[in-house]
Every structure is written in C-alpha cells, then in structure tokens.
Amino acid sequence: MATTKVKGTSKKIKELKGIKTEKVTEAELGKVQNTINELNKSQLEIGTIELRKHDLLHGIAGLRDQITVIQKGFEEKYGTFDIDIQTGAINYKEDVEADKKD
C-alpha cells in the first residue's frame, strides 16, 4: 500500500498527539519585532521631547526672574515699571489718572 503525503498532515498529527508548536513563524516574529521597535523608537522620541520641554520650562522660569529684576530696577529708578516695550515710554500713574479724567 502506497502512502501519499498530504500537505499539513504532519501538523495535524502533532495537534492530535498534543504536541504544541515551539515557535511562531518568521513572518509573525518579524511583524512583532518591527512593531516593538517602532514602539520603542516612539517612546524614546517622547522622552527626548519631554526633556526638551523640561529645559524650556526652566528657561522660562529664569527669564521670568530676569523680568522681575528688571522691573524692580525700573521701579527704583523711575518709580514705576509700567513702560511701553515698543517705544520705551514710561507710563506714570499721573498720566493714567489724567487720561481717565478726559
């Protein structure tokens, strides 16, 4: 009696005997590896962006401190720190009160 090989019979026999597949296919492995690599790259990029954001926030805090020091200097020298930052004109409180009366 001649035996013929049927594609997939070996797999079916293993299933019937309770033998489990030991590895995923190369295509499945490649797909999961690529997906995980992309996920890792994205997380690394987010980390880099967050570090840059952190540095920028510290920079902003430093600039705000500088503004406060400059305002105190104007207050001591001119009696006010209210200035037009385009022209440099000082807005004294008397000028504001005079404008309100008009």
Image: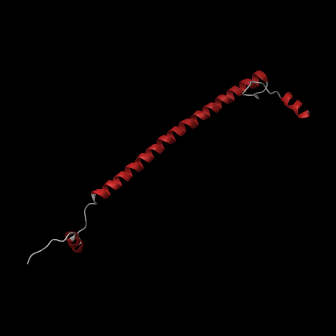
Residue at coordinates 68% horizontally, 27% vertically from top-left?
A: 69
The N terminus lies in which quarter of the figure?
Answer: bottom left
Q: Position of residue 36 (x, y in %)?
A: 38, 52
Q: Quadrant for residue 82, please give it.
A: top right
Q: Residue furthest left?
A: 1
Q: Is residue 13 above or below residue 100?
A: below
Residue at the location (75% across, 28% down)? 84
Q: Position of residue 27 (x, y in %)?
A: 30, 57
User: Considering depth in this image, is 52 or 2 the residue closer to the camera?
Assistant: 2
| Residue that sits furthest to the bottom in the current view | 1
**85 with respect to 21 (left or right):** right
From the viewer's perspective, tell me whether residue 98 is left or right of residue 26. right
Look at the image and name its color scheme.
Answer: secondary structure
| Relative height, residue 68 to residue 4 (above, below) | above
Location of residue 88 in the rendering, given as x and y in whole percent from the top left corner: 74, 24
Q: Residue at x 25, y 65 (%)?
A: 21
